[in-house]
């Protein structure tokens, strides 16, 4: 379907996307959406972006904004990729639901909360709420990209890379001076016997394939995906057992997680009723039923002491990571690392001339900031900013449980390894039982602070006492997460940011913790813990 030169409004995009997806699910091959200038087949684009997710869409927008001619191609009928379709957005909905449900359970029968009734909280219902509405977000992406950003695109058709200047779509060759590969990553099931059984889901298949209300859940993994989905599932009243090979939040890909933060997170997961096995190796997914129709009944695992156990369950959720889709481009002979990710330099250049890669296809954290900025970096370099580089080795980070967990900079342990005199500001203070302390009481934690002080959260700042510079900040609770985007910039700016400067910051919420607590120690000559 040719949409070039035609105004397509939001409502119309939603109908087109709904229709495309319905046809595709019914096994038909719906027409792709072409938004191409008439000379598209004759010219050589400045860049073709293969994959229109976070990396491809932002990359193409940046190239177009700088006067370049870009084309973005996606196999889905919308731009934006996995984040709005099946990853971040449902994760945020599930995490918001988890937080609401957590309150409903904790305060059931008090104030205006009815008695807690776990039969009312349906995983399927919350999932369906997302699924029934997600195309609204997709239509905004298409509208914005076409009408406001002036991007050329082909949506709803696979791109096949022929060589480093040519991409084929529906039998037609499109030419470009450069390619930017942005096809992302997918969950890959770990090699555990029985993993293919009915009842094993990941973040993608829980959306498309879950067709029963689980009664018990085993989560395999101890990273972000595992904790975010596990916390949600437990919050609905479905008992959740974590089988985590490394300690919870201790997986290699997660940097700078502070020990006190980890301890609080694990204690709070247990408080909500989850069972946690760290150092656990899953051995087999057990099932019952006739061959081909057998359904999960349990997971066999070996604990840290070497003993074997079985956890009964009708639902296994995999939070075991993802694999880059780099093999689509084997024809190019790109250099890959040991994890199958495309190797790039700080300008997102691959080992093949004129080929760039961005997003989850390359190493580093699989996060939106990296995907978007890597796509933009490739575009800027292509458009002649020859000195432009993107370093994603250091970044603020977060995840959800029923809480927001956010951090930037060093953990206390890392800081003590690096600096001689480390000072810590912490609330609740070290040595004080959280149950006895109604702080930090950050924005959104007041109910817990006043009625369940032990649950209201923890904040922590790590300071090099010699230079007075803040080197790490950490928070579990509510209301602080987004400030870490900016705290990260402040404490990592050249020259750093001192405890005294933090004391000068004007807080908006009385208890947001950081400015006021730093102010109490600002000016002290020999800094002491607080
Ligand atoms: C459960 C979950 C929750 C997450 N939550 C967050 C969060 O809260 N915050 C955050 O920062 N990050 C989050 N992430 C990470 C974030 O979703 C990814 O880092 C980001 O989406 C990666 O963007 P990308 O452009 O590299 O890939 P994608 O967005 O996956 O885009 C790749 C695109 O390529 C297309 N494609 C693939 N092959 C072809 C082909 N041959 N031809 C045409 N098109 C093709 C696909 O259709 C897709 O649209 C989460 C991830 C998961 C799994
Ligand atoms: N911003 C967000 O909210 C968000 C949300 C989800 C994902 N993401 C990003 O997406 C990426 C993937 O995250 P993720 O949590 O899915 O994966 P991850 O960080 O790679 O963690 C994978 C977990 O699964 C375990 N695991 C892997 N293979 C296993 C096996 N065969 N048997 C048992 N355990 C196994 C790992 O244990 P070991 O440690 O022992 O290997 C680890 O605990 C990360 O970059 C993450 O930052 C971001």
Image (cartoon, grey):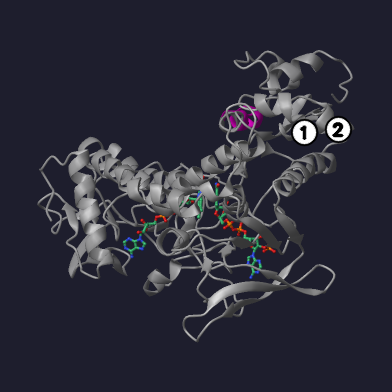
* Image quadrant, ligand 2: bottom right
Q: Is mark 1 in CB contact (under 8 Å) with mark 2? A: yes
Q: Is residue 414 visible?
A: yes
> Is residue 144 covered in magenta?
no
Task: Quadrant for the C terminus, please.
Answer: top right
Q: Which residue is mark 2?
A: 433
What is the number of the mark on residue 454?
A: 1
Residue 469 percent location from the top left of the image: 75, 26
**Quarter of image, res 406:** top right
Q: What is the magenta segment's predominant secondary structure?
A: helix
Seen in the image, is 174 located left or right of residue 223? left
**Quarter of image, res 437:** top right
Seen in the image, is 424 located left or right of residue 152? right
Of residue 108 and residue 255, the one placed in the foreground of this image is: 108
Which segment did they paint magenta?
A: 486-494
Q: Secondary structure at mark 1?
A: helix
Rendered view: 293 above or below 173: below
């Amino acid at each position: 379907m040719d949409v070039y030169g035609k105004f397509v409004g939001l409502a119309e995009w939603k109908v087109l996307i709904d229709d495309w997806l319905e046809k595709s699910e019914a096994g038909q091959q719906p027409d792709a959406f072409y938004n191409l200038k008439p000379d598209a087949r004759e010219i050589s684009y400045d860049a073709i972006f293969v994959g229109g997710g976070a990396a491809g869409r932002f990359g193409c927008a940046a190239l177009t904004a700088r006067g370049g001619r870009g084309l973005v191609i996606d196999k889905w009928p919308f731009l934006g990729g996995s984040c709005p379709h099946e990853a971040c957005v449902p994760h945020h909905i599930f995490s918001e639901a988890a937080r609401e449900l957590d309150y409903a359970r904790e305060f059931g029968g008090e104030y205006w909360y009815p008695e807690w009734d776990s039969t009312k909280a349906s995983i399927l219902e919350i999932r369906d709420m997302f699924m029934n509405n997600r195309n609204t977000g997709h239509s905004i992406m298409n509208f914005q990209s076409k009408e406001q950003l002036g991007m050329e695109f082909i949506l709803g058709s696979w791109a096949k890379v022929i060589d480093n200047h040519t991409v084929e779509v529906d039998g037609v060759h499109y030419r470009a001076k450069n390619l930017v590969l942005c096809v992302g990553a997918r969950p890959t099931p770990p090699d555990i016997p029985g993993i293919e059984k009915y009842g094993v889901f990941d973040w993608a298949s829980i959306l498309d394939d879950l067709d029963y209300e689980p009664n018990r859940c085993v989560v395999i993994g101890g990273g972000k995906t595992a904790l975010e989905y596990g916390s949600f599932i437990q919050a609905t009243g479905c008992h959740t057992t974590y089988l985590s090979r490394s300690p919870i939040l201790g997986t290699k890909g997660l940097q700078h997680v502070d020990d006190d933060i980890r301890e609080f997170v694990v204690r709070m997961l247990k408080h909500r009723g989850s069972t946690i096995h760290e150092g656990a190796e899953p051995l087999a997914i057990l099932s019952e039923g006739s061959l081909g129709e057998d359904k999960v009944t349990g997971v066999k695992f070996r604990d840290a002491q070497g003993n074997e156990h079985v956890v009964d369950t009708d639902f296994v959720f995999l939070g075991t990571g993802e694999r880059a889709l780099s093999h689509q481009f084997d024809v190019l002979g790109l250099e890959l690392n040991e994890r199958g990710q495309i190797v790039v330099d700080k300008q997102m250049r691959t080992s093949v001339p004129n080929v760039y890669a961005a997003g989850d296809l390359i190493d580093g954290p699989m996060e939106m900031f990296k995907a978007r900025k890597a796509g933009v970096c490739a575009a800027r370099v292509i458009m002649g900013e020859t000195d432009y580089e993107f370093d994603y080795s250091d970044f603020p980070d977060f995840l959800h449980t029923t809480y927001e967990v956010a951090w930037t900079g060093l953990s206390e342990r890392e800081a003590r390894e690096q600096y001689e005199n480390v000072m810590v500001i912490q609330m609740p203070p070290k040595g004080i039982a959280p149950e006895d302390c109604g702080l930090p009481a950050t924005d959104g934690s007041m109910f817990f602070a006043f009625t369940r002080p032990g649950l209201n959260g923890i904040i922590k700042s790590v300071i090099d006492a010699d230079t007075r510079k803040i080197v790490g900040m950490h928070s579990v609770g509510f209301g602080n997460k987004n400030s870490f985007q900016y705290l990260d910039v402040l404490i990592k700016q050249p020259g750093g940011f001192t405890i005294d400067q933090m004391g000068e910051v004007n807080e908006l919420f009385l208890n947001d913790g950081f400015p006021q607590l730093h102010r109490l120690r600002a000016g002290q000559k020999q800094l002491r813990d607080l």
